[in-house]
Image (cartoon, coloured by chain):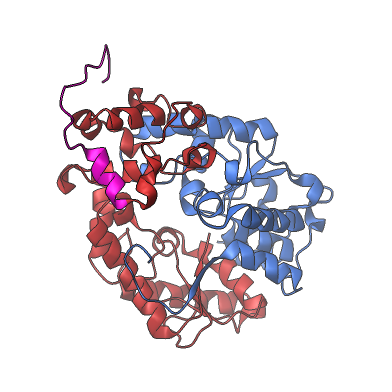
Chain colours: A blue, B red
Amino acid sequence: MKKFNLEHNFEIKNIYEYYATWIREGKLKVNSDWNKDLKIKFTVQDPCQIVRKSYGDAIAEDLRFVVKSVVGEENFIDMQPNRSNNYCCGGGGGFLQSGFKEDRLEFGRIKDEQIKATGADYCIAGCHNCHAQIHELSEHYGGNYPVVHMWTLICLSLGILGPNEREYLGDDLKEVNVFHPETAM
Amino acid sequence: MADGVVKLGGKKQSIFIDKVKEILPEGGNLNLCLTCGACSSGCPATGLDGMDPRKFLRMAAFGMDEEIKKSDWPWMCTMCQRCVYVCPMKIDIPQLVYNVRALRPREDRPKGILGSCDMALRNESTSAMGASPDDFIFVVGDVLEEYREAQPEFADMQAPIDKEGAEFFLNQNSREPVTEPDEMVPLWKILHLAGVDWTYGSHGWAGENYCMFLSDNEAWEHITRTTVNQANKLGSKIFLNTE
C-alpha cells in the first residue's frame, strides 16, 4: 500500500497475534489435555512473509505461545534455525506456480531435512504457500509427516473439530476429540 | 552461464543495476557487497540453475545484463529475504530479483504465475483461481448453513460478507472456497468463540496475489487497490491476514 500510495483507514495485522491475544484473554479456552497421553510431537514453520518480512521475532513468540498452549509445551520441538533466521520452505515468491518443480523440490530439501531432524510427528504450517509446499515435500521425500493449519489444532484442543474438518490430520488424530462424530461424511 | 573468465569491457555503460539502485531507498545498498558469501551459504536457492545470490549480484554489478535476463534463477528465488537478514551490509538482493523478473516481456514470464495473475484480473474477487464474487458468496452461505444445522452449538455462528462497520476485515485464500470448503469452518468457529466482529468482502476477498510475483506493478496495484477499497468502504479498523 505504501508502494502504491493507497490511502487506507485500517491497520494490517496477522491472525497469529490475535490467536495469542484471545487465548491470553481467556476467550479461547484451549488446553493440551488431549495430547497428555498421546504425546504427539509438533514442530512449526515460521513463514518468511509473516515473521522475517513483517512482524519479526515478536510474532514468532506469539506463534509459539499458541502452539504450546494447544499441543503442550513438552510436545513442541523447534526447528533449527528458526524465527527471523528461519529457512524459506520454497513455497513463496510464486515458486509454486512457476513451473520449475524439480528446482522447487530441491530448494525444499533443506526444509524437509530440518523438519525430520526435529523428530516431530507433525509440521504446523500456518501459511498457504508453506502448507502446500511442505505437504508436497513430506510426500516427495518420504517423510510422510502430516502438515496442518493452526486453526485445525486450535479447534481440536477446544473439542469443536468435526469429522469433516480433518483433511490434513494424520490417521492418529482422525478419531481424537471428535465433535459431532455422527455428521461424518 | 558464467563459465570461464569474465572479460569486462572498456567504457562503463549504463547498466541495469544502476536503474534498480535509482528506485530503491539507499540504492538497496547494491554497491556495498563485501563478497563474504553469507547470503549464498544460507540460501536454499544456492546451486539452482548454477546460480547463487552473491554470484547473481556480482553479475549484475559487472553489467552482465543479458545473462541475468536470460537466467531462470530469479523465478527460483522466493525473495524470502534471509540473505538481507544475514548480510552485514543489508544488501537488498530480493529487490534486484524482483526487478529482473520485470525485464522479460510479460508473456514470456512463467505461465503458471501469469495465468494466476490474469485469473485474478478477471473479476472483482481478485482470486487466482477465478472464483467470482457470486461463487464465493454462495459457497460461504451454503457451508455456514450446513454447519449451523449439523452442529447446533454453532447455530448462531456468522460468516458475514460486506458487513459495514465490522472491526476486522478478513481475507481468504481461494483454495478453501474452491476446493475444500469445510476447511473454512475451524477459523469461523474460533472467531465466533472469541466474539469477534468480522467480515469478508465480496470484492477483493482472495488473499493471494500472483500479480506481485509476476512483477507486474500495474496489475499488483489493481489487485491491492480492489482489496483496500473494499476494506475502506466497509470501515474496518483492522485488516487481518489469516493463515
Write the residue at 73% across / 61% down: A157
Residue B192 lies, with reference to residue B25, above or below; the image says: below
Write the residue at 48% across / 53% down: A128
Spot occupied by residue A174 in the image (x, y as percentages of width and height): 65, 52
Spot occupied by residue A104 in the image (x, y as percentages of width and height): 40, 34
Q: Is residue A53 left or right of residue A28?
A: left
| Residue A5 visible, this angle | yes
Asked whether B20 falls inside the magenta stretch, the response is yes
Residue A178 lies, with reference to residue B167, above or below; the image says: above
Name the residue nearer the viewer: B46 or A146. B46
| Residue A39 visible, this angle | no
Spot occupied by residue A30 in the image (x, y as percentages of width and height): 75, 65
Q: Is residue A41 left or right of residue A85?
A: right
Q: Quadrant of the N terminus of chain B?
A: top left
Q: In which quarter of the image is residue A143?
A: top right
Name the residue nearer the viewer: A48 or A105. A48
Q: In this view, does A143 lie to the left or right of B212?
A: right
Magenta stretch, residue numbers: B1-23
